[in-house]
Image (cartoon, rainbow, N blue to C red):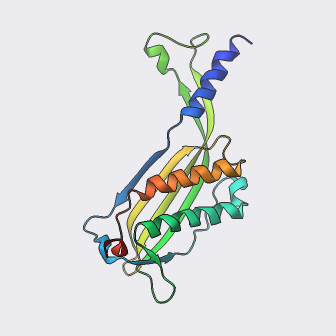
Amino acid sequence: MRRLFPVLMFTIAFAGCAVMTVSSHIERNVNFAEYVTYDWGPPDNLPVGDPRLDNNPFFRDYVQGAIEKKLEVKGYVRAVTGEPDLLVHYHASVNQKLDVYDVDYRYGYCYGDCEARVTDYEEGTLVVDVVDRKTSKVVWRGWAQNTMNGVIDNQDRLEKQVDEGVTKMMLLLPAGGNALR
């Protein structure tokens, strides 16, 4: 048991210290000030990959609500009538990951018996696409990745992680035409 304790502490520390990765891609030569309205594009039929989220209608609604709030802050208005300037859709996935850690050994110290450790965890990815409706071209794509251990089964933690990912991601989206008026 004494040998197992350092391994457990390392695994818990690693899972707790995981940092969300967020980034985006902006299409060149696009003037976002020309975009004012948006609406949801057709959803993809791809499963999230985890039945706990695939069968959770609150997850879909929560993600869409979080994205809509941030789009509003950025100066985009959901189209009520007529054709929107932009179509928005998202993809979410959860995958099992395995990582082998022996980093500390390279620095001359280690845990327990100094053997490499394998960590099994769930990684979630949320991708948001913003598409120019006229050209059908993705003009902006944002994504966030983080571990999902202990998150999917806890609605409060899931909502917090969605909020964090969407907030950080949407900071990278250029402001729309309404923000500049």
Residue 159, by quadrant, is: bottom right
Q: Quadrant of the N terminus?
A: top right
Kindly identify the residue that appears in the image at 61 percent across and 30 percent down: 119
Q: Is residue 22 above or below residue 13?
A: below
Q: Position of residue 138 (x, y in %)?
A: 39, 68
Query: For the point 47% across and 21% down, which residue is it?
Result: 103
Q: Total label count?
A: 0
Where is residue 17? Give x, y as percent: 54, 33
Quarter of the image for residue 58 reads: bottom right
Answer with left or right where residue 89 lies relative to residue 176.
right
Q: Viewed as shown, does residue 17 lie left or right of 61?
A: left
Q: Quadrant of the C terminus?
A: bottom left
Residue drawn at (59%, 27%) of the image: 13
* Identity of the residue furthest to the left in this view: 29
Is 15 left, or right, of 24 in this rendering? right
The relative height of residue 71 versus residue 170 in the rendered view (above or below) is below
In percent of the image, x 59 and y 33: which residue is there?
16
In the rendered view, would you say 20 is above or below 74? Answer: above
The percent position of residue 134, horizontal first and vertical second, equals: 38, 81
Residue 90 in percent (x, y) is at 53, 64
Q: Nearer the viewer, residue 86 or 99?
A: 86
